[in-house]
Amino acid sequence: MRILVVDDERELAEAVAVALRREGYAVDVATEGQGALDRLMVTAYDLVTLDLTLPDIDGREICRLLRTDGRFDVRTRVLMVTARDTVADRVSGLDDGADDYLVKPFALAELSARVRSLLRRDAGGTLSVLRAGELTIDVARHRAAWGEAELDLANKEFALLRYFISRQGEVLSQEHLLEHVWDEMADPFTNTVRVTVGTLRRKLAVAAGVDGGEIIETLIGRGYRLRDPAIAPVDPDPTQRIR
């Protein structure tokens, strides 16, 4: 999952970014409203933590644009993070399109929990454990398992698997995965997606005792898809699948 942290307090923004990266998220930072809008216009972020008091554009205006301007991805979750703590402020923020509202000062653990909660909505879950067949991911504890076998995953492998589960059955291109699982520092001309998918697939294959291609399919010219190996392939054309 890719997150944009927007806050004019650089040290706070970086602290939040570090905390979220430790949980496996890809995180970019913006300290001005226009910079945030520029990023949001070219990248489909899964979530943005949005300070209301910015030096150039009010955070509420940014939120309204996200919800009404067709240049932006309306599916982006918005967590408003601000010192404005009156009931009227919170109501106004939610009415402007925010999905949640967190008042400063806050504990990083609470912010992380709210981020997990908002992102679980896209995964179709209400608990911190996501499931797909024999696969389970405990997002809060940063653990993944196939049945009873716990998976030893690097941070990026965990983030990739979490995203696959949140989009189970969908065909995800390399470009899409690079945009949602890696941050803006990733080189789009490298084979980092293919390599990470390959290592994740091998670890899943060892735990499941099956061919890794039965769990994460590669569809020629289209991308990758996560499915339960006990389920028949979704794509009716077997010539479009390789392992």
Image (tube, rainbow, N blue to C red):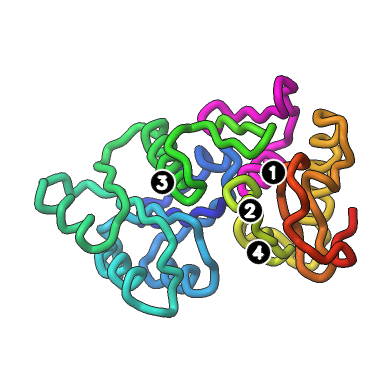
Q: Nearer the viewer, residue 72 or 186?
A: 72
What residue does disc 4 label?
176
- At which x and y percent is residue 4? 47, 56
Q: What residue range appears in magenta?
A: 139-163
What residue does disc 1 label?
156
Would you place residue 199 above or below residue 49 in this image? above
Q: Label 4 amino acid? A: His
What residue does disc 3 label?
118
**Tag 4 secondary structure:** helix
**Alpha carbon distance from label 1 to label 2:** 8 Å
Q: Is residue 50 magenta?
A: no
Q: Residue at x 40, y 34 (%)?
A: 108
**Alpha carbon distance from label 3 to label 1:** 20 Å
Q: Earlier in the sequence, mark 3 or mark 4?
A: 3
Residue 174: quadrant of the picture: bottom right
Mark 1 burial class by Cα count in 10 Å: few <14, some 14-19, many 20+: many
Q: Earlier in the sequence, mark 4 or mark 1?
A: 1
- At which x and y percent is residue 113? 41, 35
Whether pointer 1 and pointer 2 mark residues with C-beta atoms closer than 8 Å, the reply is: yes
Q: Earlier in the sequence, mark 3 or mark 1?
A: 3
**Tag 2 secondary structure:** helix
**Tag 1 secondary structure:** helix
What residue does disc 2 label?
181
**Which dot, 4 or 2, sits closer to the camera?**
4
